Image (spheres, grey):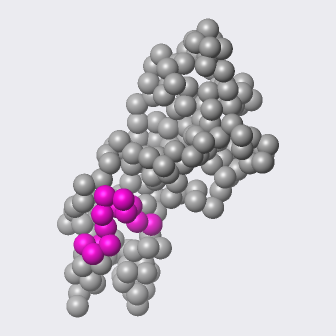
Amino acid sequence: MQPIRQLAGILESLADNEHYLFSLQDLRAAVPGQNMASFKALIGRAQKNNLLQRVCRGIYLYPKVQYPSGLVLYHTAARLRAHEFNYLSLESVLSDAGVISQIPLNWITLISSGRSHIVGCGTFGHIEFIHTKRSPENIAPQLGYDPRCRLWRASVSLALKDMVLTRRNMDLVDMELAHELV
């Protein structure tokens, strides 16, 4: 069987509205025996034939299933840094709580035990990781798991502390409303 057909068959059988993102390692396991050059060519052909859509470096979306389009950035962030301590915070949490009047479009902010980095995700937007040295044990009571986003989420109080600690611009923060929520 041709590798592109093999990949298409495996994706068709595995992908659903919950599992629609695949890392290069996932895809590599789907078509074993390919050398690196052949594998790269296969991924290129899969993109050209709309079998896969590149979200960011190393993460691909299978577009033939109904996926939650508003959650692609969140799910991608969870996949990118699955082995790090990460949580949604800063402008993302404050905007969701209504403490910041402007909603960041196609941009999510996370605090991470990994390095600071902005990941470009093409038409989907950007994921901003901000490094922290704090241990999860110290802030665990101020975190809640968001199953929709597949990420931990800071409380408004923690997000405000993170804004100060990371020296983010506080001009858009409605401090009156923030104090009511804290």
The spot of residue 16 in percent (x, y) is 30, 63
Name the residue nearer the viewer: 150 or 86: 150
Please state if 161 lies on the left or on the right of 173 as rendered: right
Q: Residue 40 occupies which quadrant of the picture?
A: bottom left
Q: Is residue 58 shown in magenta?
A: no
The answer to whether residue 160 is visible is yes
- Residue beneath the point at 44% across and 47% down: 148
Q: Is residue 12 shown in magenta?
A: yes
Please state if 177 lies on the left or on the right of 50 as rendered: right
The answer to whether residue 53 is visible is no
- Residue beneath the point at 51% across and 24% down: 97
The spot of residue 14 in percent (x, y) is 32, 72
The spot of residue 72 in percent (x, y) is 39, 48
Number of numbered labels in the structure image: 0
Query: Considering the image in quadrants, where does the C terminus appear?
Result: top right
Highlighted magenta segment, given as a residue range: 11-23
Query: Considering the image in quadrants, where does the N terminus appear?
Result: bottom left
- Residue beneath the point at 63% across and 48% down: 86
